[in-house]
Each structure stands twice: as structure tokens, then as C-alpha cells.
Image (tube, rainbow, N blue to C red):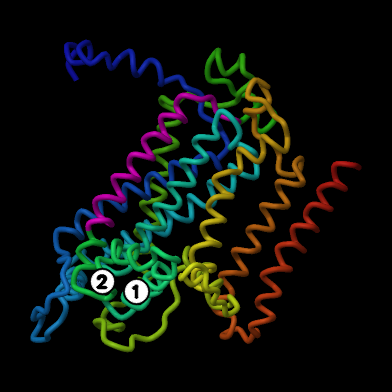
Amino acid sequence: MSEGSESRLDLDRLFARFEKKAFPLHGSFLLGELALFAFTGIVATGIFLGLFYEPSTATVTFEGESLPAAYASVLQINSLSIGLLVRRIHHWSAHIMLATIVVHMARVYFTGAYRKPRDINWVLGTGLLGLTILAAFLGYLLPFDEFAVTATSIGYEIATSVPWVGEHLANLLFAGPFPNSHTVPRFFTLHVLIIPVLLATLIGIHLLIIMKVKHTQDPGVTGRLKSQANAVKEGLVGIPFWPEQVVLMAGVFFAYATAVTLLAAFVPVHPVELYGPSVPGTPQVKPDWYLLWIYGILRVMPPLDIGVFGAAINARFIAGVVVPGAIGGMLASVPIVDTIVTGDSVKDPNVSRIQHPFDRPGRTAIGVGALVFFVLAGMAGYYTEIGLGTNTMRGLMIAGPILVGGITFGALKRRLNT
């Protein structure tokens, strides 16, 4: 770039401000970068797929067979020289992004890195997780095969179960009673335009806040390499953004690119050719892991039908809306609850430092219990296949998190007292 351009845009001043920002040394702090790279992979492959995909259920002729246009366009993508590979990279990048966000938030939670002044970023991260899951759900329908319609119909039934406004809510999202010819175009617009714009906006704000606040790693965690005078004053450990952190980020990117390409080359995704186009009476299928826990709760929820002011509160509403909504609300409110319980003040210099999970028995026990609940809820999606009874599965989902959380709390409490 020319000297005049740098002077006009004042880029040298911007670069000088951020090039020496201290970044933490521990590898777990690179999870955010991995999620970001997976998002860029999703966008890049999505642009390629969008060039060939036709968001329509109108009947077309493909290789002498009458098929829905959306389904036929996916078959066409698979027939391209690199089409199937790109489609698989798109699929596995979404899984990597979701898994990385989950692990990243777990790291933040167990180390207390969500506390002020990073509480806003925790709430943004919760929103990013929710939007990413929504984007993945919307993408289910686009191939318009048997799997897609069956999985999406579960979401439609959950939407219609909302008391008083369920039918209107479902018609708004699904463009009328599902399935219909308008749902695929609406989901396509949400999946490729609206949700990605919202995700990019939240990611941008998330990164700006990260650049603004200091990181949480202190000298007691790993070594004593200091990157700048401010880091030394604050007792932080880290490396400067340029060039060390950039080199590490490049390594993470190439590791992601290698891993996702190998996955795409050797691990198949949903075989649309085997499922076939959507027809009446499609078989029951299981959702992917990030929605399996909701499906499991739906399967074991006891029958319920309570009339309230002309509306019905049923098991589908409780399992598909109330429970996930409550979990999302509790997740977003973690910084507020932590402040109330611990009484930590943002003015306390130690509040911005990470804490070892073993030093916070209560928080760690709750987190471990929550993880056990999600694992058991996912198992509930297959409880008949693994030979468990309904009541047994319900009992495990209730007692398992309490038991494991209690044992974790007792063990850590005893460790602190010795």
C-alpha cells in the first residue's frame, strides 16, 4: 500500500495500536480462532453451493426422472467434479464451528472468564451459539430429501405447540402449514443471508470487545513471557499480536483446513441419493448431535395436556420450547448469577483473572452436572435402541446430573480443605 494511502487512512496508527496487544499463551485460547475459521469455511463453501442450488420445490426433470428442483440441484452439485467435496466441507465446517463454540464456552465457564468486564462477550457468545444452531436447523431442509422433511417437521410441530401464538409463529417461520412450496425459499433466504449477516455482526462485535479488554491469563498459568510493558504491569502472560499471534492463527487455520478436507474426503454426509426425495410417510430419523438432546427430551417427556385460557400447554411445548429456552436463559445469565453469589466487584483487579476449576467447587459441579445432563439427553434419543426403558431413561436424566455434580462438589471441597 502506498504511503499516501496509509497516511490518508491512518492505518499505521491503527496497526501500531494493536500489533503489540498481548494474547494468551495457552492453546485453549485458540478455540475462538478455530470457530472463526470454520465460519469462513462455511461462508466460502456456501457461496459455491449457492451458485448451483435452486431453492424451489417445483418439479423438474433430472436424468429422465421428475424430482423437486431443490433435491435435483443437490444431485447436480454431487455430480460436479468437486461438488460433493465442497458440500461435505460445508457440512463438517458447521459441525466444527458448533463443537468449537461449545468447548470454547465450556473453557470460559469453568475458568470464570465470563466475569466483568467480559460479561457482555459471554452473552454475545450465547447468542452466537443459538444463531449457529438455528442456521444448522434451517440448512436441514434445503436438500429436500426424506431426512430433511422429517427433521424439519419436528421443528414445525414444536413451533405450533406454543400456546396462543403457535400457529401464527409457525406460519411466519415456515411460510404456512408445513410442508408447502414456500418453506424452502424462506429457509434458503434465512440460511444464506439473514442468519449469516447476524452471525458476522455478532462475531465482529465479539472481536472488538476482545481487542479492547485485557485477556485473563496470569503468570501462574504458563511461564512468564511478557509481550509489552502494559502486560508486565498487569501481571499478564502472553505474546504480541504481530507477528507471533498471527503465526499461531495461521497454524490453526491450516490445521482446520487439513482436518475438514480429510473429513470431507473420507467421511460421507447425509446421502440424499439413498434417502430419496420427500414423499408422504417419510421414515423417522435422528437429528445431529447438536439437536439430539432436544429430540431426546421430546421422546421421554411424559404426556401432558393442560388447558389454559383456551390454549393447550402440552409436552411438546415444555420439551421443545420451555426447557431449551430456560437453558438458554440460564446460560446467558451466568455472569449475573456469579456476581450475586460471589459478590465480586469489577473494581477488584483479580476479578478479570482466570480461576482454576478446582478452586471453585460450586461452579465446577454445576457445569459438570450440566454436561452430564446433555449427554444423557442425547442418549435419550436412542434409549430404545440401547435397551433402556422410558422410566429408566427419565430417572437417569434426573438423578445422573445431581449425583455426578454432587460427587464433583464433594471431591473438590475436600481437596480445598486438605
Q: Is residue 183 left or right of residue 33?
A: left
Q: Is residue 268 visible?
A: no
**Mark 1 vs 2, N-terminal side:** 2
Q: Which residue is mark 2?
A: 143
The residue lying toward the viewer, choosing from 275 and 176, is 176
In the figure, 251 relative to 397: above or below? above
The picture places residue 290, in percent across and down from the top left corner, at: 47, 63
On the rendered image, what quadrant is the N terminus found in? Answer: top left
Crowdedness of circle 1 by 10 Å Cα count: few (<14), some, many (20+)?
some
Q: Residue at x 59, y 77 (%)?
A: 300
For residue 270, the mark is: 1
The picture places residue 70, in percent across and down from the top left corner, at: 18, 71
For residue 141, the mark is: none
Q: Give yes or no for residue 328 being in the magenta stretch.
A: no
Q: Amino acid at mark 2?
A: Pro
Crowdedness of circle 2 by 10 Å Cα count: few (<14), some, many (20+)?
many
The picture places residue 50, in percent across and down from the top left corner, at: 18, 58
In the figure, 117 relative to 196: above or below? above
The picture places residue 88, in percent across and down from the top left corner, at: 31, 64
Displayed quadrant of residue 207 = top left
Q: Give yes or no for residue 214 being in the magenta stretch.
A: yes
Residue furthest right as drawn: 418
Displayed quadrant of residue 245 = top left
In the figure, 327 relative to 181: above or below? above
Q: Amino acid at mark 1?
A: His
Give SS at disc 1: loop
Residue furthest front as drawn: 309
Q: Residue at x 65, y 77 (%)?
A: 393
Q: Is residue 69 left or right of residue 311?
A: left
Range of residues picked out in magenta: 189-216
